[in-house]
Image (cartoon, rainbow, N blue to C red):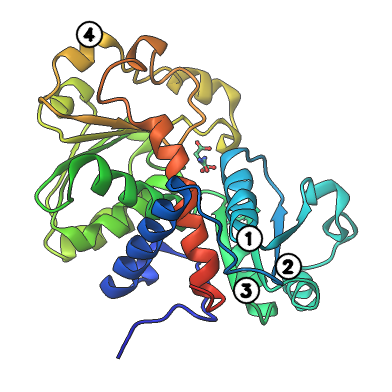
Amino acid sequence: MTSSLKGKDIIRADQFAPEEINLIMDTAARFESVLRADGRLTNMAGKVLATLFYEPSTRTRLSFETAMLRLGGQVLSVAEAKTSSSAAKGETLFDTGKMIEGYADVAVIRHPVTGSAQELAEGAGIPVINGGDGAGQHPTQALLDLYTIRKERGGVAGLTITLAGDLKNGRTVHSLAQLLAHFGVRFNFVAPDALAMPTEITAGLRDRGIEVHETPDLAEAVAASDVLYMTRIQKERFTDPAEYERLRGAYVVDAALVGQAKPGMIIMHPLPRVDEIKREVDDTPGAAYFRQAANGVPVRMALLALTTGRE
Ligand code: NCD
């Protein structure tokens, strides 16, 4: 049976079967080669994407919107959904979902509450894609991160991957750890104690036989890593500003640290960065974070086309 994502919601990174992940990667690579050749795509002609962003976003919203436009589709957008949509009047996401299916063929939501994308999806009869739900999941980021690792390193199996920073509140690392669990990697999780990876995620990985090494020591991890994935301390998830001030700046990647890295190590970051990676690192060959951001376009094109059956 050929795998299909038609009609499916994209809510969590652990929802995917390996053949679905491969299908997304292959479809993204196909779209990327058409874009590179300046080709035109019309897969989504006549279709409408609704983007509902209840939290700030630059990359995720713009890359989904350009992905839809590059596939010949159209976009409806509520940019400041929190204040300008009926959410301000108390409408539930379930009801918003019921309504949105009359307006669009596929929807992307970003929201500060964990589980919000699932609630919208339960109301909506169209595919709903989670563009980040609070400190929960960010599955489309994880897919573009995987796509980036494959492109930069030529494969994933056997790599040692270090996830560093705010592993408690960072939704990108939750999703990425679960997605990479399919590929025989080893993990280092580097975080201050207060920002450690949630135990349900580490336990889930260890149950699957994946090696996870937790340490607060970034330099030690970098010396043994093939991929260093930095994250921002997630200021907006802190209730105590003093705690944020105590923890910000916990890890900073500079040229000296990169000089001690294993040869060929790539540095990734979902962006935006605050102070975790110095500008001096940007010109080193392993600095992959801006290439990573660009990879969001073909991967999101693949997700839009596959969920609507237009691949
Ligand atoms: C991330 C997010 O929103 O979770 N940004 C993104 O989508 N590239 C990372 C972050 O905000 O730190």
Q: Identify the residue under disc 4.
A: 256
Q: Secondary structure at mark 3?
A: helix
- The location of residue 268, given as percent across then percent down, is 34, 33
The circle on residue 121 is 3
Q: Nearer the viewer, residue 91 or 68?
A: 68
Q: Residues within 10 Å of mark 3 (few under 14, many from 20)?
A: many
Among the 4 quarters of the image, the one containing residue 116: bottom right
The disc placed on residue 108 is 1
Label whose residue precedes the other's in the sequence (4 or 1): 1
**Hey, which quadrant is residue 249 in on the image?**
top left
Question: Dot 1, how many residues are within 10 Å of its Cα: few (below 14), some (14-19), or many (20+)?
Answer: many
Horizontal side, residue 235 vs residue 53: left or right: left
Amino acid type for the residue under numbered disc 3: Ala
Q: What residue sits 10% from the left and 25% below the top? A: 263
Looking at the image, which is closer to me, 55 or 150? 150
Q: Amino acid at mark 1?
A: Val
Residue type at tag 4: Ala
Q: CA distance from mark 4 to mark 2?
A: 47 Å
The mark found on residue 93 in the picture is 2
